Amino acid sequence: GLPIHDSFAAVDAHASYADALATEASSLVVAAPQRPNNDLANGSLATESCPVFVAQAGTNGRPGRLGSDVKLRRGVEVPQLGLGTFLSKTGSECRNAVVAALLAGYRHIDTAAAYKNEEDVASGIREAGFLRSDVFITTKLQANEHGSAEQVRSALDASLQRLGTDYVDLFLIHNPKGCNLLEVWPTMLELRDKGLARSVGISNFGIEQLKGLKAAGLEAPEVNQIELHCWWQQWDVVEYHRQEGIATMAYSPLARGQRFSTTGDSVLGKVARDVAATEAAVAVRWSLQCGHIVIPKSKDPHRIQQNAADGFVLSEAQMAKIRGLDCGFKSMAASSRCMELPWDQVSKPIPEGSVDAGKRGRR
């Protein structure tokens, strides 16, 4: 059988890398933070301000955690800051990034079956010396596993085996492109009710698709993970989420670095200079202060620490300036287009032998 919840333990054989990072990260251990009102369970979510992210005191020489939680509709608390692992190479690159993030104070790791690095995420948690229950793990159902309820169940079982655990904290439909949502989504809810996932949600869904689930009389997802950053702020989707009690999780919060200035004279660059931070940290901090769950991705330990965006708060004037950057820029256009797929198409199974059967997305 699968191991119990707290099956992760320290692994001495790989301690040298983790110990080196722990020494570097020890400066982050300061007083415990106050939390913003990020509470979907009670119908509220911070949208204007968020306190400085500081690490709570750690144990056994390890730094404590950074930041605040977002409470989902059913009461599960999600660490607002997470590490994204999309395009993290399997093996040491992904594993070392997870170690660096955990020792920097992150407590949320986002992975997916499609990324083929779930085993590396598990190895990184072990190598950093954390228990399973210390870390919030998000993983996702591949679009090519939408064929039947049994496929969905088998897919989660396979992810659990790769992660070395008997539950995940959040299980998402990776995108609607796999179709058959009227069978897949009820199965996700069933898996949650069986304790195999503490919460379930979706990714790359648009308002029409969310309304389709609601019209079918199905429970709303607790999370929708979408591309969201300073240059594509998606306020219409965010507002719909707020109305329906759905948490917004922002992937690609740095727009893959494609909009950062080289001279520092852009709006974001000037704000970054004013708060003595990087443009990437300011972009993450903006998303955090909007109340979103944010999962920046990096493989570099120093950048992982910078992306935590701790030690400063953006003023209302700075937030307003950044809001003015919204221009509809998509850094993950192919994935984001899934939000526009018609409900009539994605709600039903893909016909056997259809050319669309081989066009299910990865991100």
Image (cartoon, rainbow, N blue to C red):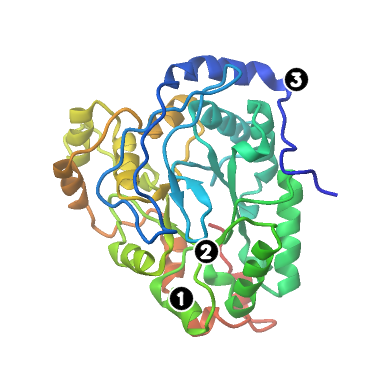
For label 3, count other residues whose C-alpha is less than 10 Å away and answer few (under 14), some (14-19) or many (20+).
few
Query: What kind of element bears circle 2?
Result: strand
Query: What kind of element bears circle 3?
Result: helix
**Is residue 203 visible to the viewer in this orientation of the structure?**
yes
Q: Which residue is mark 2?
A: 202
> Is residue 31 toward the left or the right of residue 345 in the image?
left
Among all residues in the image, which is located at the extreme right?
A: 1
Q: CA distance from mark 2 to mark 1?
A: 10 Å
Q: Which residue is mark 3?
A: 13
Residue plotted at (49% across, 27% down) = 104
Residue plotted at (69% across, 74% down) = 147
Find residue 11 and report its image quarter.
top right
Q: Which mark is residue 186?
A: none
Measuring from the top left, give residue 54's x and y in whole percent: 39, 29
Disc 2 marks a residue whose amino acid type is: Ile
Q: Tell me, yes or no, whether the two marked residues, 2 and 1, touch with CB atoms within 8 Å.
A: yes
Q: Which residue is mark 1?
A: 209
**Is residue 258 visible to the viewer in this orientation of the structure?**
no
